[in-house]
Image: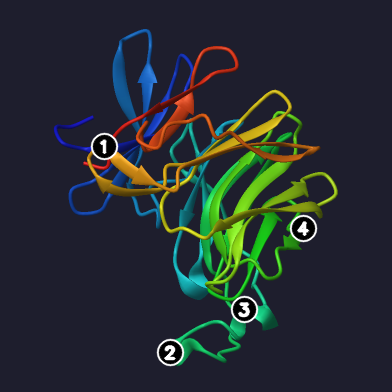
Amino acid sequence: LGAGSAARLVAGGPRPVVLVKGAEGGHRLVRYAPATRTWATIAASLDPTDMTTAVVARDLVYLPVGQGRHAAVMAVDLNTGRTAARLRLPVLEPDPGALLTLPGPTAGTRAAGRGHVTELLTAGGRVLAVSATPFAAAVTDLATHASVSLGGYTQIVGATVGGDGIVYILAGSNDPAFTLRFLRVDPHTMRLVSVWDTGVAATDEPVSALPTRFGAVFYAPGVPHSLDAFSGTNVWQVDGSGARENSTVSSNIGVRMGPGRGDSVLIYGSPA
């Protein structure tokens, strides 16, 4: 992949797909060929706006590109490396409640915008984009353009599709008094079906999310104070019956979560 290259695994399996960051832009999509045990470049000179989210559906890989009114999701054909589609994000109308909590020159601004993609997800063959601006957020089916507004929530902290096929989103707001809440969105009807309050203050720290057999699990490592000291660590298990906090996890166990064997997860890494 290149010495010192930053990379993100887009799809696993016997033929994994990896997005490799170029030294001065020009990101590449590469795919492993088991027969020759080599990596082959699928597409080059890509310029995604975010290295943290990308998904594969059928023979297409979806990447967020562009900013502002040019924000979109690009679909790249894994077989030819060509751009198969450029899918525009919906224009998000500002939520009136969010306008009241913004400080500085943005306070009172009512400009609508396409925002930026915080998560790309696949659910039942659908590709969904979770997008947000400082004033609004939404989940959009990129094929049908059906969209559900997440009114009042402007910070998307984490999202995943649960084992029950429902989209789980951990969201906050610009209001400092607002606590993190779990939103459940049905990707078939594109409706917000339930909201649960965690009672935990919003955070800028990264949150990991993974599906479970009946829902999802979210891990918030909290705020690191040193290499092995954290505060505010939270683990939530969520499904159709609600959100339950697991308080047995140590506050210095790690900063990232990944899938483990069976029903387990792995928590690892340090802020260094």
Q: Residue at x 43, y 38 (%)?
A: 81
Residue at mark 4: 146
**Residue type, label 3:** Ala
- Looking at the picture, tell me which residue is in the foreground, 45 or 204: 204
Precedes in sequence: disc 1 or disc 3 = 3
**What residue would you read off at disc 3?**
98
Q: In this rendering, would 266 be left or right of 158?
A: left
Q: Is residue 267 visible?
A: yes
Quarter of the picture containing the N terminus is: top left
**What whole-number distance in Å separates the C-alpha atoms at marks 1 and 2?**
36 Å
Instruction: Say whether marks 3 and 4 touch (CB < 8 Å).
Output: no
Please give the name of the residue rendered at 37% of the width and 38% of the height, measured from the top-left corner: 255
Q: Which residue is mark 2?
A: 104
Asked if labels 2 and 3 touch by Cβ distance under 8 angstroms, the answer is no
Q: Check disc 4 and give the amino acid type.
A: Ala
Q: Residue type at mark 1: give it.
A: Asp
Q: Secondary structure at mark 4?
A: loop
Tell me which residue sits at (52%, 89%) in the image: 107
Which kind of residue does numbered mark 2 sit on? Gly
At which x and y percent is residue 90?
65, 67
Question: Helix or strand or loop: what does disc 1 sit on?
Answer: loop
CA gap, disc 2 and disc 4: 34 Å
* Residue holding disc 1: 228
Q: Is residue 50 above or below residue 36?
A: below
